Amino acid sequence: MSALKQTTAATMVALMTWAGAASAADIKPAVLYDLGGKFDRGFNESAFNGASRFKKETGIPFLEFEPANDAQREQALLTFARQGADPIVTVGFTWEVAVKKIAPKYPKAHFVIVDSEVDLPNVQSVEFAYNEAAFMVGALAGLKTRTNTLGFVGGMDIPLIRDYECAYSHGAKYTNSKASVLGNMTGTTPAAWTDPARGRELALGQYDRGADIVFAAAGGTTLGVLQAAADAGKLAIGVDSNQNGIQPGHVLTSAMSATDVAVYLALKDARDGNWKAGAKHLGLKEGAVSWALDDNNRPMLTAEDLAKMDAIKADIVSGKLVAPDFVKSGACPPL
């Protein structure tokens, strides 16, 4: 909190930029990213792409903010609300405390939080079924591993990341009864999302212990894991957006969430007068999560692999197969 008090109004204004020219539109959208930077090649960048799509289609610019530390969140949100920004989209569960405090003070403004649920009459909460995406990439890893040993590198040790690890492990076991997963978390503070050097170190350690595929759910730290795969001549799995092309030939797939779609729809609904408060839970059925398939990883997969993945997806969508949900249950079922 002391760091927040030391942040001057001038500094906050300097950190906020308009992504486009001035507009006479009825809405003044704002996107507030999470730690790691707007161009993190993951969650934040996906949100930026969604807002940019909205701007391209409508001509309406958006205000944006990249926090340098957690202490800036509340003041930034307050500043945007005071300036009349509406809707205000916050990217990441770490905005939850600030949204809960600021949103009630501006009941006429529309707030959106991606990756968390805030039960307030002027807040829309968007959560993704990350467990479904993690189960899918785990299933693919189980099909492609040659050592039957897989790895997982998480970011901050929180239930959401344990959810990724749990579903990934169950997915691997679903397609390969011999598969086992080595797991490490990068840390217990928000710094865990922005430490690619540590991610690389953890992944290399798992490769040394026999893993041939490592899945990273670690924000910007994931880039270090992808680098480790290239360095070790092994495979990794990306997260949040399609990261298959970051280390071509060394990324088996990516567990994707359509953060860009969530942000785009939130802004579009606000413009069209269709915005609604409440929770939105989006998964494979809605096309909001998926596993990445493109020219970078297609050569690694056989027709049989693709058929099996299609069948697993269909079973999850139909409800025949249910991916474990650590966040809801508070525990990971036995493998």
Image: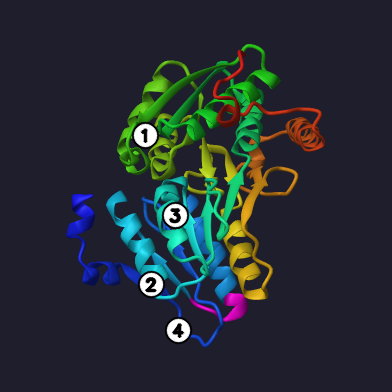
Picture coordinates of residue 30, whole percent (x, y): 46, 68
Residue found 76% across the figure and 27% down from its top: 321
Q: Which residue type does callout 3 highlight?
A: Val
Viewer-nearest of discs 4 and 3: 3
Disc 4, disc 3: CB below 8 Å? no
Spatial CA distance of label 4 from label 3 is 27 Å
Q: Which residue type does callout 1 highlight?
A: Gly
For residue 35, above or below residue 213: below
Residue found 29% across the figure and 56% down from its top: 72
For residue 217, above or below residue 242: above
Q: Residues within 10 Å of mark 3 (few under 14, many from 20)?
A: many
Spatial CA distance of label 3 from label 2 is 14 Å
Residue under label 1, please give it.
199
Residue under label 2, please give it.
82
Q: Give the secondary structure at mark 3.
A: helix
Spatial CA distance of label 1 from label 4 is 39 Å
Spatial CA distance of label 2 from label 4 is 20 Å
Viewer-nearest of discs 2 and 4: 2
**Residue 58 within the magenta-colored segment of the rendering:** yes
Residue found 34% across the figure and 55% down from its top: 73
Residue under label 3, please give it.
99
Disc 3, disc 1: CB below 8 Å? no
Q: Residues within 10 Å of mark 1 (few under 14, many from 20)?
A: many
Q: Give the secondary structure at mark 1.
A: helix
**Residue 171 within the magenta-colored segment of the rendering:** no
